[in-house]
Amino acid sequence: MVVLAAAWRMIAIHAPALANFAPLMALTFCGAVYFRDRRLWLVPFAALLISDLYLDHYYATRFNETWNWPSVLVRAVCFAAALAIGHFVAQRRSWLTLLGGTLGGSILFYLATNTDAWIRDPFYVKTAAGWWQAMTVGRPEFPPTLFFFRNTLVSDLVFTAAFAVAMELAALRAGQSSLLRGALTPRVKENA
């Protein structure tokens, strides 16, 4: 699933309508929510980082720009934050905390990466108006940044819901109670 998600992210760059519509952030977040073995968190996190480096190379060569390593670090921190948010949600599992964690991760990524673009890109004026431009319309040769945020938010919500439903169905098939209900209370087996 992780390989398909990384491949989707790399293929989607050739379909502009799918820009930032990818399952990897949701998979990283859900990995921290559902997997108790923290080593398993590294698989989607590594796929995110590797596909991000590929995308950096693609955009740098296509638009004749240079890589900006501090910006790569900002995105990596956002991906790591998805793990931390997922771990927090795992301690308080419910559909509401899952929704809140998904929204929080999407908004954090949007604010951090666009603020980083405003700081590092000489196109943007270093004023509140320049920051607002970076947050809303972006640079004229690209679609508006709100378009990318919309795709990020929708994909994070859709793929998180899909992963959560898949995990819930797997728990039901295994005869377990909901994985999102009562994470803090011990599960009691009923005697039949």
Image: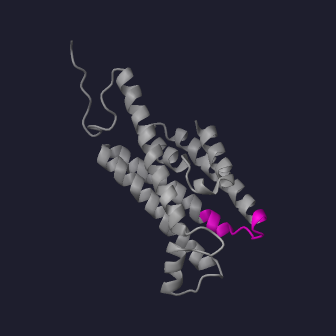
Residue extending farthest left = 191
- On the picture, is 164 further left or further right than 10? left
Q: Quadrant of the N terminus?
A: top right
How far across and down, in percent of the image, does residue 182 sit?
26, 37
Is 66 magenta? The answer is yes
**Residue 83 makes an appearance in the image:** no
112 is higher (above) or lower (below) than 6? below
- Residue at 48% x, 37% y is 37
How far across and down, in percent of the image, does residue 50 sit?
67, 50
**Residue 135 makes an appearance in the image:** yes
- Residue at 64% x, 81% y is 123
How far across and down, in percent of the image, does residue 31 sit?
48, 42
- Residue at 54% x, 38% y is 40
Figure quadrant of residue 77: bottom right
Figure quadrant of residue 16: bottom right
How far across and down, in percent of the image, does residue 126 sit?
56, 86
- On the picture, is 40 further left or further right than 101? right
Q: Nearer the viewer, residue 35 or 98?
A: 98
Q: Nearer the viewer, residue 99 or 140?
A: 140
Is 170 magenta? The answer is no
- Residue at 44% x, 62% y is 107
Provide the residue span drawn in magenta: 61-73
